[in-house]
Image (cartoon, rainbow, N blue to C red):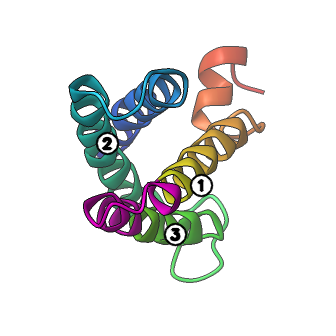
Amino acid sequence: MTATYIHLSAAVWALLAGTSQLLGQKGTPLHRAVGWSWMIAMVVVAVSSFWLTGLMDVLWGYSPIHLLSIWTLICVVASIAAARKGNIRRHKAYAAGAFFGVVGAAIGTLMPGRLIHEWIFGAV
């Protein structure tokens, strides 16, 4: 259950920080600081997901949603690399892609049978 709480805590921060990054001014010290915390949260969300298995056992307990975790790790690395090279257009594209992936995953947690669905709507 610890992995679940680590995953959820990082995911909530990723959603909040990601939203503020999209809406806030870019290139400021605050954007950089929140951006680094967001990137770390995204890595924690992606890595911790590999301890959360069994929802749809396609391959050793893993499901297609775990492909999103791999993609998220790729996006984080690519986004940081692009920003360091000054390619802000690519940085924004990879960061936004990772963020909208998290939003999609968050929406997926509302499916019946998922833990968040049970917390919000009660066991069905």
Give the class, few, some or many, for how many residues have Cα within 10 Å of label 2's Cα (few <14, many ≥20). Answer: many
**Among numbered discs 2 and 3, the one appearing first in the sequence:** 2
Q: What residue is shown with label 2?
A: 41
Q: Is residue 30 above or below residue 101?
A: above
**Of residues 65 and 25, which is closer to you in this image?**
25
- Quadrant for the C terminus, please: top right
User: What is the magenta range?
Assistant: 76-91
User: Circle 1 — which element?
Assistant: helix
- Quadrant for the N terminus, please: top left
Q: Would you say 103 lies left or right of 73 here?
A: right
Q: Is residue 83 magenta?
A: yes
Amino acid type at image mark 2: Ala
Amino acid type at image mark 3: Trp
User: Circle 3 — which element?
Assistant: helix
Q: Position of residue 102 (x, y in %)?
A: 56, 45
Single out the mark in the foreground, 1 or 2. Answer: 1
Predominant secondary structure, magenta span: helix
Residue 97 circle label: 1
> For the point 54% across and 45% down, which residue is it?
99
Q: What residue is shown with label 3?
A: 71
> For the point 62% across and 63% down, which residue is it?
65
Amino acid type at image mark 1: Gly
Q: CA distance from mark 2 to mark 3?
A: 15 Å
How many dots with numbers?
Answer: 3
User: Circle 2 — which element?
Assistant: helix
Can residue 1 be seen by looking at this rendering? no
> For the point 71% across and 43% down, which residue is it?
108
